[in-house]
Amino acid sequence: MERRDFVKKSMTAGAAITMPGYVYSKILGANDRIRLGIIGIGSDIKLGGKGKDEINKFRKIPGVEIAAICDCDKDILRKEEAEFRKRNEKVKTYIDFRDLLDDKDIDVVSITTPNHSHALITIMACQAGKDVFVQKPASHNIWEGRKMVEAASRYKRIVQVPSNAREPNGNREAYKYARDGNLGKIKWIHGLNFKPRMSIGKVKGEQPIPQSVNYNLWCGPAPMKPLMRKYLHYDWHWDWDTGDGDLGNMGIHFLDGCRMALGTDKVPEHAMALGGRFGYDDDGETPNTMLIYFDYETPVIFEVRGLPSDSIFRKSNWVVNKNISMDRIYGISLGVIVYCEDGYICNNAAYDYRGRLIRQFKSNGQDTRINFIDAVRERNASLQNAHVLDGHLSMVLAHMGNISIRLGREVSNSEIRERIKGFPELVESFERFDNHLYANRIDLRKTPVTLGPMLTLDPVGEKFTGDFSEEANRLVKPTYRKPFIITEKI
């Protein structure tokens, strides 16, 4: 039976569309042209999107051909197809990602869809014998992230999950400098994601789905529910069913950096988060301000701030541009700070505590996409600088923080201070958190903060144990919508 017929019959029967056992592999030589398919072009037909960016970057790599593009919004698809015609380049177009995966002429895929479909498409691509470059975050929940790792292993696929921390920017070399003891013992690690995020607005009722969108495909494994926000595209980041908030959007770049700075392939046993969606009342569900504590032997604290540095910039019509002032710590608003006994690392540079530069680091490493293509040609996953396992493990941290705050309750400023008084680095960070909100005219003496429980994760089984484990484990693996189901056996 042809695979397409099998899929259609399986869908009719309500079966899972992932199909263990189906795999083909075209052997590529060093001089063979790699034919790449882009799944998910952009979040907005006017603004473009990540998929368009991937097209521009991959097509510059020698030996790579963008052979197919796919998007469930036909207007976005047609617009990008027109760009190929202007360049006199042939490209196949697909509305349904499954049709692209059926195309045996495609060797590798780049996935730039919303978070909730990353894992499903990655796993199906592995089963179809295709290597995968999937955008961060790797997964939308802990369980499916592990399934991505299993699929890459079973089907012997190269699966890459890029992050800013793994680009050749000198950060990796700076982290190693600290781990080697050049600044004394590492005391704690601080991740920052201070990026302006304006309100997405508030609607009074169900909104129409754009006529150009196949909404069934857009929802995929997520609930196919009424649209209760102004825009379908991009603002899905702030809906728990499809996104992971800014912790899993931009924050994962620097969470990955925190884990790299630790030099560990382990996840923390405990995590706790606090925060809220402050400064506006809109249709977003995820926090715009967070503080997360990861109980490694060397503590890791991560901060998310979507509001600017003070209320002057926080207006209903403020626009993300160079005039928006964001908070900074040691001069940065995005990145990782490694605090040591005799100095600190700030992204790719080492300083003493007088602020004097000790050393700036450079890297001879490869661009992540070139690294991916080289690993594909060599059929050697060990060459990767952003292996799917790294993407999964770092995203487990983000999931732990998000699950903690989703299980939290609103408490007073004084209760938070009482709860965290045994964690000195957390107390220090909460002071900054409080001052930041106060500068935005949000007084925590009057405005409650959501405080999540300290969760305990079994790092082997990747499930929660102890207090709140029953509630937390419900968020480890969702209920997938048929037929877009990831099966237990990959």
Image (tube, helix red, strand yellow):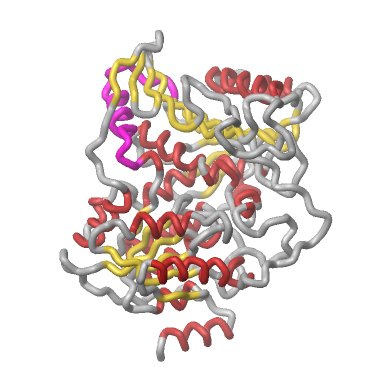
Q: Is residue 272 above or below residue 215?
A: above
Front one among 467 and 84: 84
168 horizontally vs 451: left or right: left
Q: Which residues are magenta?
A: 166-188
- Where the N terminus falls, by quadrant? bottom left
> Does residue 26 appear anywhere in the picture?
yes
Q: Quadrant of residue 231?
A: bottom right
Question: Magenta segment: does it hold 178?
Answer: yes
Name the outermost residue toward the bottom: 1
The location of residue 363, given as percent across then percent down, is: 25, 35
Locate the C terminus by quadrant. Answer: bottom left
Report the front residue among 320 and 145.
Answer: 320
Q: Nearer the viewer, residue 421 or 252?
A: 252
Identified at 44% across, 66% down, the residue is: 83
Q: Magenta stretch containing residue 376, yes or no?
A: no
Give the vertical position of 483 relative to 40 (above or below): below
